[in-house]
Amino acid sequence: MTATLDTTTDIVEETAAFLADTVRPQVDRYTRNEQMPDDVLSGVTKLGLWAPFLPPSVGGLGASWVTFGQLHMAIGRIDSSLRSILTAHSLVAESVRRWGSAAQKERWLPGLASGEQIASFCLTGNESGSASSVSDTYATSDGNGWVLSGTKKWTTSAQRSRLILVFADTPAGMTAFLVPRDTPGVSATPTFGMCGARANLLGEMHFDQVHLGPEAVLGPVGRAKAYVMTSALGVGRLSVAAGCVGIIEACLDLVVSYTKSRLVGNDRLLDKQLVRRKVSDMYCARRTGALLVEHAAHLRDTRASRAIEESWIAKYPISEAAYTAASHAVELLGANGCSSDYPAFRYLGDAAVMRIIEGTSHIQQDIIADFAEHEFGTSHIGTDARVVERGGR
Ligand SMILES: Cc1cc2nc3c(=O)[nH]c(=O)nc-3n(C[C@H](O)[C@H](O)[C@H](O)COP(=O)(O)OP(=O)(O)OC[C@H]3O[C@@H](n4cnc5c(N)ncnc54)[C@H](O)[C@@H]3O)c2cc1C
């Protein structure tokens, strides 16, 4: 049962208190141990943070996407693993809300709102990262339904999820399936030893001749790439961009407090010009990042056609800026930056992951160059520039 909060201000404030009291004191330890404690997940459930954008009629908070962005900034500032778990869950919850039949919504949305059905989003396979092809997972019709087989790598929450949204190849093209974790033939293997988001319950999902009824198909058969995948990853990029603003804020917190008290000779480290330049760059990146996230979220709230486009434009520069900020944090703390006594190195590992998930920076650059080609350059040479749909995410 999720708590009911009166206003969006309440949820942002309640979340900040939960992060300060419950998450922050233990995040370094549990990240090192690659575990996500139960009290953190139950706190998320109590606050209704699993999918706050779902309507109150199914147990959600009815929060706007702007509020979702604020929440994921606050969570990302303290723990990228937790934010990643919520990102993956949000992709699935929003996919069911957007593309589900009435029966699918009735069956799944209440559990997605409450967190009873922690969800995983399974797109990446052994041979299918940026290309978003799913040839290593396939489903064939068996007359009444489908038989699904294959393996998905790098699945956030795989160690714990109850509902899995799987993208598979079918004779008609890529199709999305809602697969309950307890379906015979479904299993998970934990993945350990990542450099970042280490407590995100990562794993590989295996599907061995999994029999599914026709009700498992989410959205149109054969069209999952253009429909379910595209809209879901728009939410993912918004969440990751917001989380990266949080990483930049965490780096600022650490760097400013450290360099203020660290003396070099008689001077504070913060008074050194080269240090001030880095701090000012981080500060500006945080401000512009927050504005980009708010803008992209607002476009989602108003159902503007550019909403998905703006999520690319937010995620790419903010994840790059988070990586730079985390690298500055490691550098400016000297040996302490390389030590587990300080969180700088955790931030760097987390930021490295953020440049890769929900579309790598290279893929984002490629897509954003398409936007540029579409918008500019025609006045001089008169080309009929069009945005072409790209294979990558
Ligand atoms: C911690 C973590 C959690 C994850 N969670 C999930 C999850 O929950 N669900 C899920 O489906 N996936 C998940 N992923 C996988 C992630 O989405 C992929 O790693 C990502 O899409 C990149 O794919 P890849 O690793 O196969 O890299 P590749 O696609 O092999 O790319 C390797 C390199 O080549 C570059 N490259 C690829 N294509 C091009 C191109 N056309 N032009 C220029 N450069 C290119 C890339 O930018 C990259 O630098 C997760 C990954 C990590 C690290």
Image: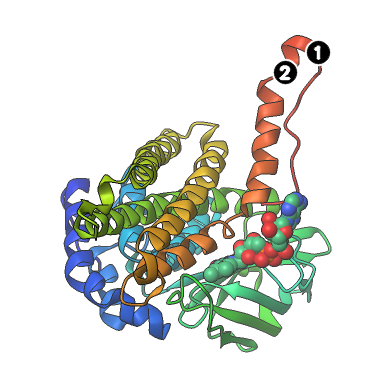
**Residue displayed at 28% across by 75% down:** 40
Query: The N terminus lies in which quarter of the figure?
Result: bottom left
Q: Label 2: which residue?
A: 377
Distance, label 2 to label 1, CA atoms, is 7 Å
Residue 302: give x, y in percent of width and height.
42, 33
Q: Position of residue 92 (x, y in %)?
A: 50, 62
Using residue 245 as the reference point, say whether residue 162 is left or right of it. right
Which amino acid, mark 2?
Answer: Gly
What residue is shown with label 1? 381
Asked whether 16 or 114 is in front, the reply is 16
Residue 338: image quadrant is bottom left
The residue closer to the viewer here, 59 or 126, is 126
Q: Position of residue 89 (x, y in %)?
A: 45, 65
- Disc 1 residue type (three-letter): Ile
Question: What residue sits 52% from the left and 72% below the top?
Answer: 156
Ligand 1: give its quadrant.
bottom right
Residue 177 in sight here:
no
